[in-house]
Amino acid sequence: MLKRVHFPSSPLPYLLVAPQLAITLVFFIWPASQAMYQSFLIEDAFGLGSEFVWFENFQVLWGDQHYLDAFWRTGIFSLLVAALSMGVALILAGFAQRVVRGAMVYRTLLIWPYAVAPVLAGALWVFMFNPTLGIFPYFLDFVGIDWNHYLNGNQAMALVILAAAWKQVAYNFLFYLAAMQSIPNSVIEAAAIDGAGPGRRFFSIILPLISPTTFFLLVINMVYAFFETFGIIHAVTQGGPGTSTTILVYKVFNDGFVGLDLGGSAAQSVILMVLVIAMTVVQFRYVERKVEY
Amino acid sequence: MSIKTLLCSSALMAATAGVAFAETEVQWWHAMGGANGERVNKIAEDFNATQSDYKVVPVYKGNYTETMTAAIAAFRAKEHPQIVQVFEVGTATMMAAKGAIYPVEKLMKDAGEAFDGDAFLPAVVSYYETPEGELLSMPFNSSTPVMWYNKDALDAAGAAVPTTWDEVQETAQKLVDNGMDCGVSFGWQSWVMVENFSAWHNIGMGTKENGFAGFDTEFSFNNEAVAARLDGIAAMTDGNLFKYGGRRGDSLPMFTNGECGMWMNSSAYYGSIKSQAEFEFGQTMLPLDTSVADAPQNSIIGGATLWVLEGHESEEYKGTAQFLTYLSSPEVQAWWHQETGYVPITTAAYELSKEQGFYESNPGTDTAIQQLSLNTPTPNSRGLRFGNFVQVRDVINEELEAVWAGDKSATDALNAAAERGNTLLRKFERSAK
């Protein structure tokens, strides 16, 4: 145990953190507690009458097959988005690190997609994959694939995963590149002298050494897929066809803003909040400590 | 201190004086984009030009759902408009909001505006009346599903315009035999194939007079008549007699580019079809299923009405009432009807369009009105009043898509839809208390 050290108390530290605290209170704690409170209510849309029902909204969700389906769908969606975007970023970073000439240009170009707003990213992919106008369905037709994501749920899912992963590649690329550059050259050179080729060096030296970054990115990408993909889904499929691309965050929007079921929607957002808190806890507790090399 | 008070009070006086002399503003939130949005602006401008006391300000708030959500959110924040346009499936939600809405008939009485409920087409207003017959919202843009047909294609195939479902099938066969891609298609499938099919054949969609008599209603559209018709349509997918083209109006291009010879959807597609179709087209009444009824009852409407919200000054309500009177005047209504394909909401506007010779120069454009006023509406055909109906329609869409894909029988799909729908009704019943 550390010995407690007493410093003379001064209001200055409190003053310095006050703005940050105020922002957290106004933009996070307050709306979050409102959502919590609302999740215990069954309320009409206009807020004229409400009934306090404790955990009934949550119970209903628990017994709702469509909600449970959305849960699994979200899990698959976010895992695939994370895997795809991290995989591509890793490969690109691996190559970018080896580029000698024009490295700056190459890297800068790879970072660009990160600046694209999700809705715009969605719109881009919608155009490219439009069943009648898009360029990709035209090519897919040659290999015998009849592309129509307006009717085919799996194709719609594939499209939103592609669009969501594409947008996140740049972010992952940045982190992977930084991680790779922080690996001491001596380690890699030593391996090279021992006769390890580029492939072997990548898998036996680089990959283990950047595993903390991988874990960090996994959590960040999961959170991204859970929440920030709303814009993409709204622009590309609006959750359809049927409910085949309705992930949890889209269902919150749909039930709350289209269906006007405020209590149920609030309950769903509380569950999402708990999920993201859990992920953040995992991130803080384990990333820095447990990933050893 | 005293100088400050003085300044404040004089500023206040100036402000109130300013308000007293300015025109009173009436906010009108609507969901009409594109060409119809311009027509809405024209109506407001024309009204503003007729008098100088009030100024109607139309504001486009996105699609129907977005407009309704915006108005509700604004109401909760006490920043709501006087008038908001709400689509017909939102009727039950609006109606249940007792302290939030100002019934139009009451508004007219309070504001001293002349109001005659009998001037309106019964099939239009009955959708928006209380069981006691009080009009709650002002009908604005109402339409009803009709059957559009490609006259050139029908003539080429030697087929007559069908009036029954058996004839639809025969005609579809003839069209396909004659080289067409598909015989018949439709959009807004819940509205056209379930809601209107039921009303047209005078069978109930749900208990309690389709929800009019109470929130404790349950769906009954999972009956044999509807199931048999849907199974019949699903069977028509063989040989492309029927082709599913997506929800809402997504299948419109299939009709206008000559793929499908017949298309059932809203009469308000008149403008779009007129500008897109490069063939002669016509509209006729929905087909009758002779195994269900001997004669059609009447169809029900879709579209939107204008709701007045509580919580404003009486002066603003006077302006609102005057504007609604202007809006429902025969001249404005006839113009709106002829431009858009929406039905005129008053008998006078219908008569005026007749006098102007609109139906003679545009044959078939009165199909919608004839369908709506075919008979006096029964409890099965006056309209629907189900809570959470926006979501219920999505449920019906999902289940019907499973039928068209051949994954489910119509009976199974309708049972599932009714069960899921009833859950939503119970939820609404509780929240509306």
Image (cartoon, grey):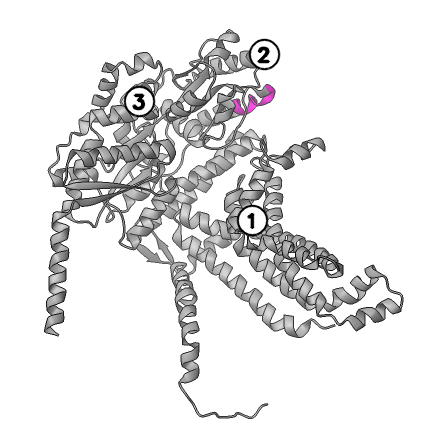
State the image coordinates of residue B220 (x, y, percent, origin top left).
Answer: 41, 33
Q: Which chain carries label 2?
A: B
Q: What residue type is labelled 1?
A: Asp
Q: Are marks 1 and 2 in contact (CB under 8 Å)?
A: no
What span is colored magenta in the figure? B232-239
Between discs 3 and 2, the one toward the N terminus: 2
User: Mark 2 — residue?
Assistant: B177
Q: Are marks 1 and 3 in contact (CB under 8 Å)?
A: no
Does the rendering let one see residue B172?
Answer: yes
* Picture quarter with the N terminus of chain B: bottom left
Q: What residue type is labelled 2?
A: Asp
Distance in Å between CA atoms under marks 3 and 2: 36 Å
- Between circles 1 and 2, the one closer to the viewer is 2
- Between circles 3 and 2, the one closer to the viewer is 3
Q: In this view, does B113 lie above or below B294?
A: below
Q: Which mark is residue B191?
A: none
Q: Do the residues labelled 3 and 2 touch (CB within 8 Å)?
A: no
**Which of the 4 image quadrants contains residue A106?**
bottom right
Residue at x 40% of width, y 80% of height: A15
Distance in Å between CA atoms under marks 1 and 2: 43 Å
Does the rendering let one see residue B134?
Answer: no
